[in-house]
Amino acid sequence: MPIQSRVSLSVLGLLCVLAVLVAAVAVPAGANPLDDENPCTDDADTASAHSVEVDGQQATGVVAFPDTDPSALVVFAHGYGHTSASWVDHARRTADQLGAAAVAMDYRGTEDVDGTVRGWWVAEGAADLIAAARDLEARCGGFDTIVLFGVSMGGNASGLAVAAQPTRNDGSTPLFDWWFNLEGATNVIETYQGARVLAPANTFAANARADIEAEMGGTFEEVPEVYAEHAVVNRVDDIAASGVKGVYMAHAAEDGLVPINQSIELDALLTEAGVPSTLDVFTTRDGGEGGTTLSGYSGQDVSPLAGHATETSTTHVVMRAGLDRLAELLEEDAPLCQGRRLHGGPVTARLGC
């Protein structure tokens, strides 16, 4: 498909880079909690520092283990303005409540610049996610299920990880069984074009433009093929060939950071390619926090609508849906539904799930 067909100059494209920064969560220091006798169990309800070598560099993150040998691994992919520190509590809960090992990586190149987390290192992030999954698979003696779970910019990194078609260490089985893509920024071309529009008047936009150009090695005009390669919507054939069993997506219709059109586009492309796909669309906040909404930019302080969730949340409707589906998958071995479903309004499902 032509590159330009994936480009939207809408200001909404910018919004997917204006991520809400969160306070850093302390990560216990020290070596990985892995030993010869019980390499993947931990009696303490904690997450510890984790590292793995990738392309001659050390990729860092956090890891949590349950108190019994895990049969599943969840690999979390963070968003823009975040690091693995935002996933400490999610990793702990995944280990404690679901009995799965959980890991989140920082993406090599990400740095703190005067208190602001900077970097759109999604290709590096994809490689780090793959390396972490393979490393833990080897150390833990294998997993029945490996889930890749990305949020916001993490949808870009995790989508590229699936598109790379990685395999388990034995080389015969797909590495990732399921891909969760919550409010994912899966069209980096749209993101970049939006950032350029507002960069002269907006510091976040200027940072995003610079960070994306650093990842791509130049502007869109200079290296359009690199931008195209990094856009997950252009990699659907690779995702289909990866062997992934299915994709779960959740997105708020009023998302003020990552426009919902990115998930709608990806859902349609995955379905066309024969990849089982679910897209849950949420209109109202359903008792949780609202997040960043489109209407909020017009000065509406209180809204019943759901917007973009911060990835540390467990109560925002989008994050709650993703975490609930993860629990159903791992605890009940419940298959992911297929279809596009609207919550807070009439429900439409392609396959009646």
Image (cartoon, rainbow, N blue to C red):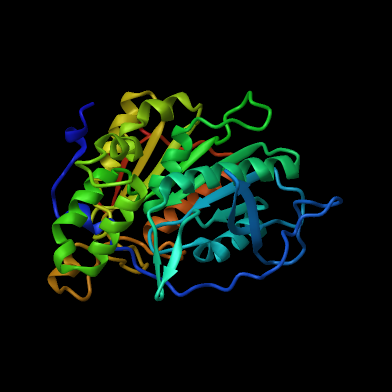
* Residue 181 visible in the picture: no
Q: In this view, does 210 lie above or below 301?
A: above
In the rendered view of the protein, which quadrant contains the C terminus?
top left
In front here: 282 or 255?
255
**Residue 275, percent from left and from top:** 40, 28
Name which residue lies at 45% across and 59% down. Answer: 110
Name which residue lies at 67% across and 70% down. Answer: 29
Name which residue lies at 44% across and 33% down. Answer: 163
* 139 relative position to 262: left or right: right
**Residue 231, percent from left and from top:** 32, 39
**Residue 348, percent from left and from top:** 27, 39
* Residue 188 visible in the picture: yes
* 274 relative position to 167: left or right: left
Q: Is residue 49 above or below residue 192?
A: below
Name which residue lies at 23% across and 63% down. Answer: 206
What is the tally of numbered marks visible in this picture?
Answer: 0
Q: In which quarter of the image is residue 22?
A: bottom left
Q: Quadrant of residue 238?
A: top left
Q: Quadrant of residue 186?
A: top left
* 18 relative position to 46: left or right: left
